[in-house]
Image: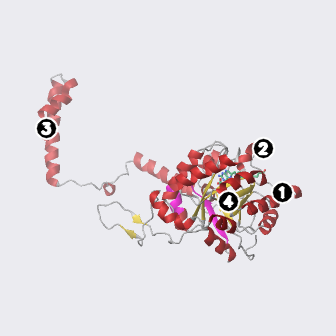
Amino acid sequence: MNSARSRVALGARLVREHGKEISPARAAAAATAGRRWASTEAPKTSAASSGPRITAAPAPPHKNITLHSLATKVRKGQPISMVTAYDYPSAVHVDKAGIDILLVGDSLGMVELGFDTTLPVTLDDMIHHGKAVARGCRRPLLVIDLPFGTFETSPQQAAQSAIRVMKETNFDAVKVEGGRQRLPNIEAILDCGIACMGHIGLTPQSYSSLGGFKAQGRTAAAAYELIKDAEALQETGCFALVIECVPAAVADQVAKAVDIPVIGIGAGPHTDGQVLVFHDMLGMMQHYHHAEFTPLFCKQYATVGHTIQNGLADYKRDVEERRFPSMEYSPYKISDAELATFMDMVASHNETKQRLASDGQVKSAADDIDNENIKVY
Ligand SMILES: Nc1nc(=O)c2c([nH]1)NC[C@@H]1CN(c3ccc(C(=O)N[C@@H](CCC(=O)O)C(=O)O)cc3)CN21
Ligand SMILES: CC(C)C(=O)C(=O)O
C-alpha cells in the first residue's frame, strides 16, 4: 500500500481478538529465554595493556519494535526495513543497525546449511537458529518461518508447529507461505494468539510445483489471484505480508488493495517495506553454490565475502611465513626469575634425556625423567 494511506487496520484484528499486542511482554520473557542484551555503555576500548583488545559496542536504542509501532511507522509513511539473520553475530549486527524486522527465514537451509532449496529445513533447524538470533537481539520485531511440511496438512499441525516455535524461541510472530489455500491453517495459528505474517508471490516452499524459483503474477489472471490472496490474508488477521518476485506494478496494486503492510522482495519500489537475505545483500556468497542462488533483484551493499577471503588468505600467508604471531600477539608473561628456574629445569631434563638415550633406554626415558625430575612438581 502506498505510504500516504492510513494503516489503521494493522494488526487491529489480532490485537482486538487476543487482547494485547505481542511484544510488550518480550523483555521479561526474554530473560527466562536467556536472551542476552548488549552493553548499554558508550563505546570504549580496553585500556589494560595485557587484556584482549575488545571494543564494547554501544547498545541499540531501547525501544522495541512492536506490531503497534510498526503500524505507526507505516501510518506516518515511513518504509519498513526487514532483513534475514540466522545466528547470534548477524542478529547483533541487525539489531545495532536499527532494522525494523528480523526474519529467521527458511532460506537458512540454502545460505547456512548448503541445501539447494528450502524444502529440507526442519522445525528443529528453525528453532535452533531462532534461539541463537534471540540471544543477540532486543529491538527488531522477530519473525520466524514455519518450514515446509510443518503446517500444510491440517490446521492442528499448523497450530502445534507455531506454538512450539513460539514457546522455544520467544519470537514475536511466525511467517507462513501461501495464499487462500492456507487460510484454515493460518486461522488456527491466529486463534492460538500467535501473530502471523503471510507470504505470497514466489513461495519457495512450492519449488516443486512451481518448477523452480520463478517470478510470479506475470499474467493478468495470476496477478489478480495475488490481490485476492492478499485481501483474504488480511481479512483472516495476518499483520503483514511478504510479496516475493512479482512485477513492480503488480506488487503496487497488491499493496494498494490491503491496509496491512506489504513487504516486497524482488517486487519493486512501491511496497511498504523491503526484505533481503543477509548473505545476498552483504555480498557474502563466494561459493559457487551460493552465488548461483543470489537473485538478480538483490542489491549488494557490501562485499563481506571478499573481506573474509582476504583476511583468511593474509592469515595463511602470515602463519606460513612465520609473521604471525609476533611478540605483540604473545601477551602471557613469565617473570625473569621463574623463567631462569624453568630454563635450569629444561637443561637438567635434556641432560637426563641424553644420558638415558646413550644408555639405550630411550623407550622408558619419559618415566625415568619424571622420576628423576620429581622436584619439578
Ligand atoms: N540466498 C537466497 N536469497 C533469496 O532471496 C532466497 C533464497 N536464498 N532462498 C529462498 C528463496 C529463493 N529465492 C530466489 C532464488 C532465486 C531467484 C532467481 O534466480 N530468480 C530469477 C528469475 C527466475 C525466473 O523468473 O525465471 C532471477 O533472475 O532473479 C529468485 C528468488 C528467494 N529466496
Ligand atoms: C526471502 C525471505 C522473504 C524469506 O522468506 C526467507 O528468507 O526464507
Q: Secondary structure at mark 2?
A: helix
Q: Quadrant of the C terminus?
A: top left
* Residue at (16% x, 25% y) in the render: 358
Question: Cβ–Cβ below 8 Å for labels 2 and 3?
Answer: no
Q: How many marks?
A: 4
Q: Which of the numbered marks, if any, corresponds to residue 197?
A: 4
> Is 147 drawn above or below residue 240 in the view shown?
above
Estimate how packed mark 3 is, as few (under 14), some (14 to 19) or many (20 or more) residues with alpha carbons within 10 Å. some
Image location (x, y in percent) of residue 326: 33, 54
Q: Which residue is mark 1?
A: 225
Image location (x, y in percent) of residue 350: 17, 35
* Residue at (65% x, 75% y) in the render: 72
In terms of depth relative to the viewer, which is nearer, 211 or 326? 211
The disc, 1 or 2, on the residue closer to the chain's N-terminal end is 2
Let me know if residue 218 is in the magenta part: no
Q: Which residue is mark 2?
A: 209
Q: Secondary structure at mark 3?
A: helix
Q: Which of the numbered marks, if any, corresponds to residue 348?
A: 3
Could you give the CA–CA distance between mark 1 and mark 4, rounded to whole angstroms?
A: 18 Å
Q: Amino acid at mark 1?
A: Glu
Could you give the CA–CA distance between mark 2 and mark 3, rounded to whole angstroms?
A: 76 Å
Q: In the rendered view, does 214 fall on the left or right side of 81?
A: right
Question: Cβ–Cβ below 8 Å for labels 3 and 4?
Answer: no
